[in-house]
Image (cartoon, rainbow, N blue to C red):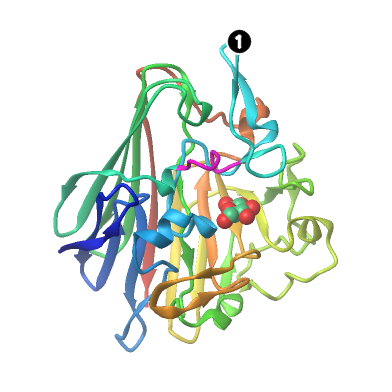
């Protein structure tokens, strides 16, 4: 199914594409290649929409909270809004103090993507990002595919190529609430597990210090599932600095995250070939979303698979660099049980 999703200020129309397989249905818009709805049954077979979203493209254009959007060319922060690649310095627009968050004000999640294909269970969208776009080198062709498989798992597949060496670090910024997006008070009760043994602490501006710190004995230890809200107010510096959980964990094994809501019986696991996962507890969420629901602080959580934040300045970490003419390909899978 394809339906109108409003108009851009340029007059161009945006669309909402529905895909289904098994018991799961997803809706994706070409505005920001954003995931708008994700309908998953609960243990009694009742469907609920478990991602935060907006009713039309206007909300996505505001970019508030980056809700559901495809983030690129480089997700998360780049210190000083610049980097050196191949001996050349590249500058980006600072949009958080002196630093760059999610590639700056003209981020991919607010652009109109082109539809490449839409079948019953998959949709592929494409973005052309010219040389110098957001400050990055190389004319880039980027595709994201959302595909549901027979088990109802949602695959997010990213493919990109550039004619110059460049940075590719694409992710999706969906916020999940397995109780349903309306149950804004319920997100912090859900159980999260993150098998990662270390996380990367950041300074007050969210820039990693370079340390890889063990989670052992800290509120960051999610190796055994626990309610997200249990330790979030603990007296622990990394939590103070970021206003709650907003950190990168190593992807130690797959699934690299599992979320469950005992009341609805829904669980979601995340698997990826990316080296890191940013767990953001929605500490600064403040958006008027779908169906008149206001999404306040911590009404959903993001689990963003990606290279480590600011990894371009940490050569000791996996590098988000793709050579000219080389295919960038990553895949993240959200699997559900109920
Ligand atoms: C970052 C947060 C930021 C949020 C914006 C997340 O990916 O980790 O620090 O506030 O995006 O919505």
Q: What residue is shown at x 43% (from left), y 82% (from top)?
A: 265
Residue 149 vertical placement versus 336 (above, below)? above
* Residue span colored magenta: 101-107
In the picture shown, does residue 76 fall above or below 93?
Answer: below
Q: In which quarter of the image is residue 92?
A: top right
Q: In which quarter of the image is residue 244?
A: bottom right
Q: Which of 318 and 55 is in front in this view?
A: 55
Give me the residue at 44% from left, 19% from top: 323
On the image, the x and y values in percent for residue 13 come to: 24, 53
Q: Can residue 328 be seen in this view?
A: yes
Residue 113 place in picture, x, y as percent: 30, 44
Q: In this view, does 50 lie to the left or right of 184?
A: left
Q: Count the marks: how many?
A: 1
Point out the image quarter for the C terminus: bottom left
Query: Residue 193 at what x, y percent from top left?
Result: 58, 65
The residue wearing badge 1 is 87
Q: How crowded is mark 1: few (under 14 residues within 10 Å), some or many (20 or more)?
A: few
Q: In this view, does 124 lie to the left or right of 49?
A: left
């Amino acid at each position: 199914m394809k339906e109108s999703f409003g108009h851009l200020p340029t007059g161009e129309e945006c669309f909402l594409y529905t895909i289904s397989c098994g018991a799961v249905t997803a809706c994706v818009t070409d505005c920001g290649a954003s995931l708008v709805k994700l309908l998953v049954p609960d243990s009694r077979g009742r469907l609920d929409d478990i991602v935060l979203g907006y009713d039309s493209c206007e909300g996505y254009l505001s970019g508030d909270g980056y809700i559901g959007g495809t983030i690129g060319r480089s997700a998360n922060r780049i210190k000083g809004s610049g980097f050196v690649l191949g001996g050349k310095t590249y500058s980006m627009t600072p949009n958080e103090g002196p630093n760059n968050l999610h590639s700056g004000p003209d981020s991919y999640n607010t652009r109109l993507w082109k539809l490449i294909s839409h079948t019953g269970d998959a949709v592929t969208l494409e973005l052309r990002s010219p040389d110098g776009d957001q400050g990055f080198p190389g004319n880039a062709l980027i595709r994201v595919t959302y595909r549901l498989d027979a088990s109802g798992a949602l695959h997010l597949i990213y493919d990109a190529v550039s004619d110059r060496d460049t940075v590719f670090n694409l992710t999706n910024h969906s916020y999940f609430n397995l109780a349903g997006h309306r149950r804004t008070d319920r997100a912090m009760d859900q159980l999260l597990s993150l098998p990662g043994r270390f996380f990367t602490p950041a300074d007050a501006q969210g820039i990693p210090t370079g340390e890889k710190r063990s989670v052992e004995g800290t509120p960051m230890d999610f190796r055994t599932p626990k309610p997200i809200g249990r330790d979030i107010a603990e007296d622990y510096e990394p939590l103070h600095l970021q206003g709650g959980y907003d950190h990168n964990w190593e992807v130690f094994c797959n699934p690299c995250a599992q979320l469950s809501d005992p009341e609805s019986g829904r669980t979601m696991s995340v698997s990826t070939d990316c080296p890191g996962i940013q767990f953001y507890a929605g500490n600064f969420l403040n958006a008027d979303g779908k169906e008149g629901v206001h999404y306040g602080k911590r009404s959903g959580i993001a689990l963003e698979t990606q290279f480590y934040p600011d990894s371009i300045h940490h050569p000791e970490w996996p590098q988000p660099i793709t050579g000219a003419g080389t295919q960038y390909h990553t895949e993240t899978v959200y699997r559900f049980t109920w």
